[in-house]
Image (spheres, helix red, strand yellow):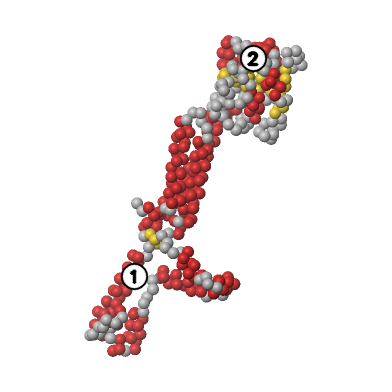
Amino acid sequence: MNWNYFDITGYISVVLWLCVPLLWITHFCRRPRRWLCHIALAVAMLAFVFAKINSVNYVDKIQPDRSEEMAVWEAEQDAQRKAMEDSRGEDVAKIRFAEDATGDFLDVAGMDESDRKYMEKINEPSVPDWKKDKKTRSEGRKKDDSVEGKIGASVAREGIDIDSADVVAESEPVMMAAADLKMANSIDGINLKLIRILMVIAFGIIIADYFRRINVYQEAYCPLPFPSEWVNGLTPLPAVMERPDPARRSMVEELLWLIKRGDSFLYLGSDHYVINKIPKSATRFAGVFKPVDIIRVSADEHGVNDDFVFESLWYRRGSFVVDSAARAEQLMEHFLELLRKRKATRAKVSQSVHILWDFDTPIDETMLRDFAKLGRATGISLVINKYRKS
């Protein structure tokens, strides 16, 4: 393998994009998942930057090696001279001297005028076509009468030779045979194309990973109000779960998190520190949508009945806070009756509803089993704060 196909930046890009699949494998094998798939995208983008630098500043400047063409051209010149020598054998000089030039093997003095001119043309040093093009470009620069040309001439008179500066800038280019140059360009194109494909895949993995983690408590991030039908179709929402210890967020932050992702909640608890911290309204998605009301329901509240609470949660019209254990048990029993009817008609909430139980008294086991069945069918989740930490 020719290691001159790439510059150091090109090989750095290869090492970087080789790390991308390793980051993906580690991300999928590790629990809880964090940011490795995002790092993989950043590494792929960095690999593309190095690959582009290598392509523009190195591969595109590789020069073809003309040594083989020069050898063929010199062989053709020698063959022409040999053929002339054979055809003009009687004109070949009988005596050769050390100071004779290459074209002095013929006795030009003994030829007539037309033959002499023909031989002078043959003996003139010829130039390959690619050198002629280069010479023409050089002469074009020397005869530049433009303003830029005059400025360049004045700079040269002050001690800076523009042509010599060009020579220094273009000194010692990387030379390759035609086959190697073609291979270098091919590998460079494959490298850039492969990195682009990896970046597209990395972006797709991030999107898929986001939806796979959105209902996983320890791994979810960046709450966004996506339809629950999409989210729960990829990762089902647990019908009944215990809030882990230690929790990722405080209870107030948990409730606001649920609203940001477009869901509604019913907080049933007696922790007055938490209740006093819960705002009267909250916004979804950085205030883009209309604020959601958070209504407090006390034990002696008769204006807010259980049906109103249930329907408001079902249609995402608001969230509620209940600080009475007796009223909470009454709500739970009534909710189970309504959920049985909704399950019979195969009705389901358009956006998930979360009921958080935060009382010292544990919830009834029969009620838990019923919620596990009905919540899964209707899209309602019951979260139990077993450790009572705000």
Alpha carbon separation for disc pair 2 and 1: 96 Å
**In-front residue for pair 103/251:** 251
**Image-based side of 170 in relation to 315, left or right:** left
Relative to 374, say whether 284 is above or below. Answer: below
**In x, y percent, where is residue 382?**
60, 19
The answer to whether residue 206 shows anywhere in this view is: yes
**In x, y percent, where is residue 248?**
58, 26
**Image-based side of 195 in relation to 346, left or right:** left
Q: Which numbered disc covers residue 359?
A: 2
**In x, y percent, where is residue 193?**
46, 48
Dots 2, 1 in contact, CB < 8 A = no
**Image-based side of 49 in relation to 78, left or right:** right
**Image-based side of 258 in relation to 165, left or right:** right
- Residue type of the residue flagged with mark 1: Trp
**In x, y percent, where is residue 252?**
66, 24
Relative to 6, say whether 334 is above or below. Answer: above
| Mark 2 or mark 1, whichever is nearer to me | 2
The residue under the point 52% across, 35% down is: 35
**In-front residue for pair 366/244:** 244
Relative to 249, say whether 298 is above or below. Answer: above
> Mark 2 or mark 1, which has the lower sequence index?
1
The answer to whether residue 190 shows anywhere in this view is: no
Q: Mark 1 highlights which residue?
A: 73
The residue under the point 37% across, 63% down is: 65
- Residue type of the residue flagged with mark 2: Phe
The tally of labels here is 2
